[in-house]
């Protein structure tokens, strides 16, 4: 089943969370990964999206991009775009996974099956993408992180049922304690 799945990844191409999701999907053996890239003829609707994810604070994203470029032998001044770098990196991780790049604007008209994973997108964009997925019959997953906090939303359509084994309310458990252990040899 997983070998026949198609996953559309939409998010800032500099996001560490996007790279982490893409890496895990590729290594799990998903059949097709489609990286959604910003359109050349963007009509300006993505201005908020482009500014929502502040890349200067995403150390994981920078690390992934540097590692991917080094792995592929691409220098920082080479003209390969971020979507192509991610595509080539994923293909190298698992050659049996088909990885392609599609313009973000084309997903609404060309994609009718699969799962759209929206990474680090503003709420208004998540709602718009979820509606598009509902209209076309696609599944929708939205994920974002902010430090140690994270949020996941899944919409698998009107026919999806959840069968809760015990009926208990899900718990939110805050972080209770954090310890820093300093090795005396390092100080």
Image (tube, rainbow, N blue to C red):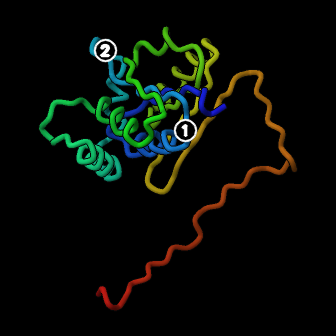
Badge 1 crowding class, 10 Å Cα cut-off, few under 14, some 14 to 19, many 20 or more, is some
User: Which mark is in front, 1 or 2?
Assistant: 1
CA gap, disc 1 and disc 2? 32 Å
Determine whether the residue tagged by mark 1 lies in a helix, strand or loop. Answer: loop
Tell me which residue sits at (40%, 38%) in the image. 90
Residue furthest out toward the right: 166
**20 shown above or below 159:** below
Tell me which residue sits at (87%, 50%) in the image. 166
**117 shown above or below 45:** below
Asked whether the residues under the numbered discs 1 and 2 touch, taking CB atoms below 8 Å apart as contact, a structural biologist would say no
Left or right side of 64 for 21: right
Left or right side of 66 for 9: right
**First along the sequence among labels 1 and 2:** 1
Q: Which residue is mark 2?
A: 42
Badge 2 crowding class, 10 Å Cα cut-off, few under 14, some 14 to 19, many 20 or more, is few
Res 157 → quadrant: top right
**142 shown above or below 148:** above
* x and y percentages locating residue 136 in the rendered image: 60, 12
* x and y percentages locating residue 46 in the rendered image: 35, 22
Tag shown at residue 140: none
* x and y percentages locating residue 50 in the rendered image: 32, 30
Looking at the image, which is closer to me, 27 or 136? Answer: 27
Left or right side of 173 for 78: left
Determine whether the residue tagged by mark 2 lies in a helix, strand or loop. Answer: loop
Res 105 → quadrant: top left
Tell me which residue sits at (36%, 32%) in the image. 87
Q: Quadrant of the C terminus?
A: bottom left
Res 152 → quadrant: top right
Looking at the image, which is closer to me, 47 or 135? Answer: 135
Q: Which residue is mark 1?
A: 29
Q: Quadrant of the N terminus?
A: top right
């Amino acid at each position: 089943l997983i070998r026949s799945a198609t996953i559309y990844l939409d998010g800032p191409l500099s996001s560490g969370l996007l790279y982490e999701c893409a890496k895990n999907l590729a290594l799990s053996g998903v059949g097709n990964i489609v990286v959604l890239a910003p359109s050349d003829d963007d009509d300006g609707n993505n201005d908020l999206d482009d500014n929502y994810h502040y890349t200067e604070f995403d150390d994981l994203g920078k690390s992934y991009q540097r590692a991917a470029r080094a792995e592929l032998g691409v220098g920082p001044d080479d003209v390969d775009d971020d979507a192509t770098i991610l595509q080539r990196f994923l293909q190298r991780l698992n050659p049996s996974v088909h990885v392609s790049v599609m313009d973000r604007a084309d997903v609404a008209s060309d994609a009718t099956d699969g799962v759209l994973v929206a990474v680090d997108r503003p709420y208004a964009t998540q709602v718009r993408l979820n509606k598009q997925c509902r209209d076309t019959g696609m599944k929708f997953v939205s994920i974002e992180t902010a430090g140690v906090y994270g949020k996941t939303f899944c919409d698998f359509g009107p026919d999806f049922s959840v069968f809760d084994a015990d009926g208990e309310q899900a718990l939110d458990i805050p972080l209770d304690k954090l310890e820093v252990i300093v090795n005396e040899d390092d100080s």
